[in-house]
Image (spheres, coloured by chain):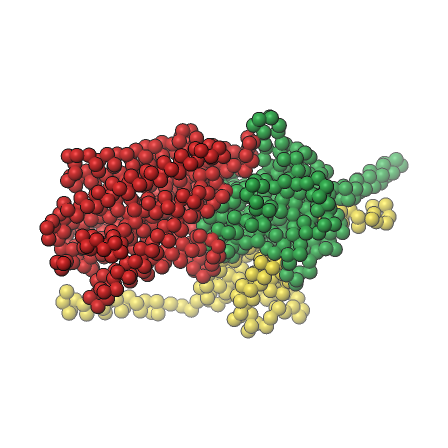
Amino acid sequence: MSDSVNHSRRSFLEKSAAVGAITIAPGILLHQVANAKPDDQPVSDSVRWGMLINTNNCEQGCTDCIDACNTEHGLVGNDRPQSDTQYIRKVTLRDKMTGHELSLPLMCQHCETAPCVDVCPTGASFSRKDGIALVDKHICIGCRYCMMACPYKARSFVHEEVNNQTLSAPRGKGTVESCTLCVHRVDKGEIPACVEACGKGMHDAMMFGDLNDPNSAISKELEKHGGKQIRADLQLNTAVRYQGL
Amino acid sequence: MTNRFLRITFILAGLVLLFPVAGTAETPLPIIHEPEGEGVKCVEPEEVMRRDHMNFILHQRDKTMHEGIRTSKYSLAECIDCHVQPDEKGNIASVDTEEHFCNGCHEYAAVTIDCFECHADRPQKFIDRGGKSASLQEEMHQMLTANEGMGGELK
Amino acid sequence: MKKIEYTAIEGNSLAYYGLLAGLGLVMLIGLLAVWYMEHNGHYVTGMTNQIVWGMPHVFAVFLIVAASGALNVASIASVFRKEDYEPLARLSGLLAIALLAGGLVVLLLDLGRPDRLIIAMTYYNFKSIFAWNIILYTGFFAIVGVYIWFMMDHNMYRFKKQAGLAAFVWRLILTTGTGSIFGFLVARSAYDAALMAPMFIIMSFSFGLAIFLLVLMASYNWTGRELGDEVVSRLRNLLGVFVAAVLYFVIVYHLTNLYITEHHGVEKFILMEGGQFTKVFWIGQIILGGLVPLALIYAPGVRNCRKTLALICTLIIIGGLSTMYTIIIGGQAYPIEIFPGYEVSSTFFDGVVNDYTPSIYEIALGVGGLAVSLVIVAFVIKVLPFLPTSLADNK
């Protein structure tokens, strides 16, 4: 009797909470599927994908974004932390003068004038027209100059043979890789795995959207409350911005 | 060195060079598994594929990588989805073996490919990842379409 | 001007074949190390996501820098018209090519995908100094090759000066490019300095001449040819000037950094708190590579001692390798200042000094490259007339 009613009600509450989370969590809007670029159309610079991270909402011990990224890209650790790949990592900061502590996720900042793109001898490190910085692993020779050049230490080198790669994240020994802003998902109209996981966990710390669209949620939030670049002095015009820094 | 010595050396060298021809059997032809199904055809005719498949893949990869064009006609993932299937015992050959669709011919022709240094050599569903998390939207979709006595969908 | 006679060395002795065999063995060991690193992946080396460039790059950059400096002697003869250096020009050109070849072999075999060399030579991003360097290095082989041809061919001898000038300008651009590999990087506190390029040029003068002197003395000593004191002391004095000039640039570099608050962290690291890097800097680069050679070069009493000069050159080479180690690896060991003013920690080794222990494979590769250079010199001087029959005084 009451069992079946409670079951239905709990199920209803779960579903509505989840839907609520979807609409409340910034950037995760089901209608984004409608904005998916058609498969046969090239990307254009009318769109610039970006992320906004609110460090005030980022918990120190939480690694939801990292776990999601690792799962999405099939990043398996080899118990060699110094050479294992990390696309995204949590950084704990402590202001030397005030003692104020904060935590934030750090990944490729997808700079407009990326140093990694400038230094790559073969052009494997490049920026797509919609702002996403990528490594074309077909022509990467593994010289690691981009790793030397990146001010955010965003890139990793694959130090060992890789097997069981996921379909959307080909990766192999001897090439360099980094956060792709989940380009395989973005092209389908989805959002990066890290942003999705942050929203799913209801942390409300990460947002994704089109920086070129003044009506997008992320642009409106940036206009209202601002968003800083890390190492703004380098004037790289990063696509990832932070609040609370 | 004397003339006689040189002559003997060259004759011996010539005999050594004949070895590959002397005692070889024919190299076995590659085994090509045809994809299952009635009227299932490749995206291009066989003769075209035999000569040009590498060019299709080469151009597609640049278009996908640099322009985000992800049409499926020449997509590597689509090739693999169709051509790499489990055998009667349900096993999928790894690209390191002769039984893999790509490697069978490539090993016969002695042409090295390095696609599979990075790319998965089998369809996604056969990759053993041990616990993949579905995307949130997939989960939502599953929840919304499962009618557990609630009736109707939530909008 | 008296005509100089050049002859190939005999190269018949057991010692000579022993030298070739020994160098060949070192090369083989290097090749085996490369196979191991390439087959297993770079996790077997000391290089990581934090220390991205290691021992191979220390050797490679040293050899490449020395290569352009080794051409100096020929340039002094052809471009600056100092006839006294004329007999040494051929060996100078040969050594330049040999050292560059050795350096490039090390660099290319350390790549993550050395099988993609063709890609490196056909896909160019012209904003990258690395891409320019590929053109500069291959062009160097061509230009110096032509220069040597003109030096050795009676019909082309009259164009030698033009070829020499072209080679001189080319190597200045090349070394500027090599220094700019580091100078152009904004990311790391130890780099990002316009001074890197001219500092590399002046270091090339010093390292190149030190190696040239060693090779010259060894090849004349071991073939019983006369090498007069005039030639040697001229080169020795030149070496003194170059070592002093290098010290000057190093002082300017560090003084400037000490003035700039934002660079105090990395300066404190290199000069005081860097552990192995501080030791390598002070003992290797400054004392052994700079002060002791200077003292020995200008000390009275050892002026004509060849053994002392060999020691001086060896110390300069050790100093050169130490300099590269401090710049390349020390510069990476100091953490990137992503959040100035904050203490930083993460799973990706942000905010901490990075460890580096070179693996035996990297060292084998580096030394193997040096062996490649020496084998080229040893072999070519037997096959072609590169060395003057005699460099005795008052000729």
**Residue visible at 65% across and 45% down?**
A51
Residue A179 visible in the snapshot = no
On the image, which quarter does residue B38 sit in? bottom right
Residue C38: x %, y % from top left? 42, 49
Image check: C279 left or right of B90? left
Screen quadrant of the N terminus of chain C: bottom left
Q: Nearer the viewer, residue A203 or C144?
A: C144
Q: Nearer the viewer, residue C251 or C286?
A: C251
**Residue visible at 39% across and 38% down?**
C253
Residue C285: x %, y % from top left? 33, 36
What colour denotes chain C? red
Residue C209: x %, y % from top left? 26, 46
Chain given the colour yellow? B
What is the residue that sits farthest to the left in this orientation?
C394
Residue B61: x %, y % from top left? 56, 60
Image check: C329 left or right of C28? right
**Total numbered labels placed on residues in the image:** 0
Image check: B135 left or right of A150? right
Q: Is residue A21 above or below residue B87?
A: above
**Residue visible at 52% across and 36% down?**
C337
Q: Is residue B48 above or below residue C223?
A: below
Q: Is residue A152 above or below residue B118?
A: above
**Residue visible at 23% across and 39% down?**
C312
Q: Is residue B43 above or below residue A219?
A: below
Q: Nearer the viewer, residue B94 or C388?
A: C388
What colour denotes chain A? green
